[in-house]
Image (spheres, rainbow, N blue to C red):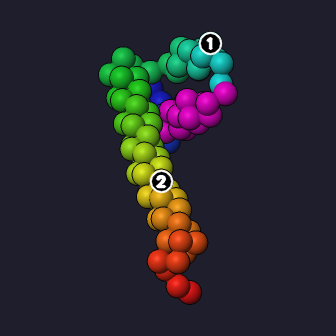
Amino acid sequence: MSTLYDLQGKYASLLELAEDGTTDPEVLADTMDSIVDAINDKAEGYAQVIRQIKADIEANKKNVTVSKHGLKLINLTSVLFHSGWLKQ
């Protein structure tokens, strides 16, 4: 049985590959297959990886939303300035 540190390392590596975006799915599948743990440990490790990816996706969605609102504000400010409605 692996230690907690080893499990984290294995699943941390899996997470890095999954988040890379350029990793061949075959390599990802091989990495998953190479993790030798009890089925419950493996399921929990995969669940943690999935939760982290979902959290990253939600954080990125919020950043994109903020960026879009910031861009809209910059565009609106520019339009108001050039139209004479907004003075320096």
Circle 1 crowding by C-alpha within 10 Å: few under 14, some 14–19, many from 20: few
Residue 39: image x %, image y %?
Answer: 36, 17
Residue at the spot 47% in from the left edge and 50% down from the top edge: 64
Helix, strand or loop at mark 1: helix
Which one is nearer the viewer's eye here, 79 or 10? 79
Residue 48 percent location from the top left of the image? 38, 35
Residue assigned mark 2? 68
Q: Where is residue 41? Give x, y as percent.
A: 37, 26
Pick the residue in front: 81 or 65. 81
- The amino acid sitting under disc 2 is Lys
Residue 16 higher or lower than 35, as above or below = below
Residue 26, picture quadrant:
top right
Q: The magenta stretch spans which residues? A: 8-22
The answer to whether any part of residue 13 appears in the image is no
Q: Could you tell me which quadrant the N terminus lies in?
A: top left
Is residue 77 toward the left or the right of residue 42 in the image?
A: right
Main SS, magenta residues: helix
Q: Residue at (56%, 68%) from the top-left corner?
A: 78
Look at mark 1 in the image and give the residue it sits on.
Answer: 26
Tell me: residue 3, above or below residue 86: above
Q: Is residue 15 magenta?
A: yes
